[in-house]
Amino acid sequence: MEKTFDEMIKIKVGQIWEVIDNDFWSTGKESVMVGEARRKASIHLSCGEFIEIRYPFEWHFRTIDNVYLHANPTDILKHCRLYGMIEEKIRFGNRHKLKQILDDNLLKYIWESEVE
């Protein structure tokens, strides 16, 4: 049996994903102030936002405004599409924010035909 496109995509460090709907949330480990109390809360990411996979743990990423969050792989695959891969020298140099990487085109764009 042939794999579907979604089954062929593997989440990896250095990838940039674009949120494709308005149903994507982080997994809720972030601490936020609600009134005078600290609460654990999910963070909503809107359609069109970009995330960069930063660490190989399910799955830590940063947003374009440099907020670090995480989500499970099923949610990433369901609510995002693979957009590109950061150039290795840029990723290993670790000096650029996601916004700079996107603005300066420091990535290789991924097309459906290129996904392993």
Image (cartoon, rainbow, N blue to C red):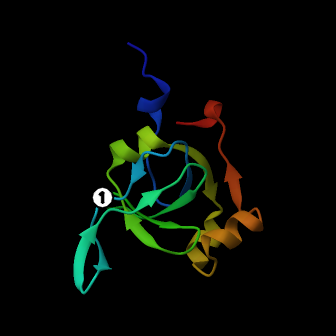
Q: Quadrant of the N terminus?
A: top left
Image height of 116 relative to 72, above or below = above
User: At numbered mark 1, what does the secondary structure look like: helix, strand or loop?
Assistant: loop
Q: Is residue 18 above or below residue 8?
A: below
Looking at this rendering, what residue extends furthest in the right direction?
Answer: 104
Q: Which residue in the rendered view is the most extreme toward the bottom? A: 36
Left or right of 61, for residue 17: right
Q: Is residue 81 visible?
A: yes
| Residue placed under numbered mark 1 in the picture | 27
Between 37 and 93, the one nearer to me in the picture: 37
Look at 35% across and 47% down and name the residue there. Answer: 73
Q: Amino acid at mark 1?
A: Thr
Left or right of 64 in this view: 31? left
- Residue 10 visible in the picture: no
Q: Residue at x 64, y 30 (%)?
A: 113
Task: Return the x and y of residue 5 as percentages of the image width and height.
Answer: 49, 27
Task: Give x and y (percent) for residue 4.
Answer: 45, 22
Residue 70 lies in quadrant: bottom left
Point 43% across, 58% down: residue: 44
Eyeballing the image, is 67 above or below 57? below
Q: Nearer the viewer, residue 59 or 21?
A: 21
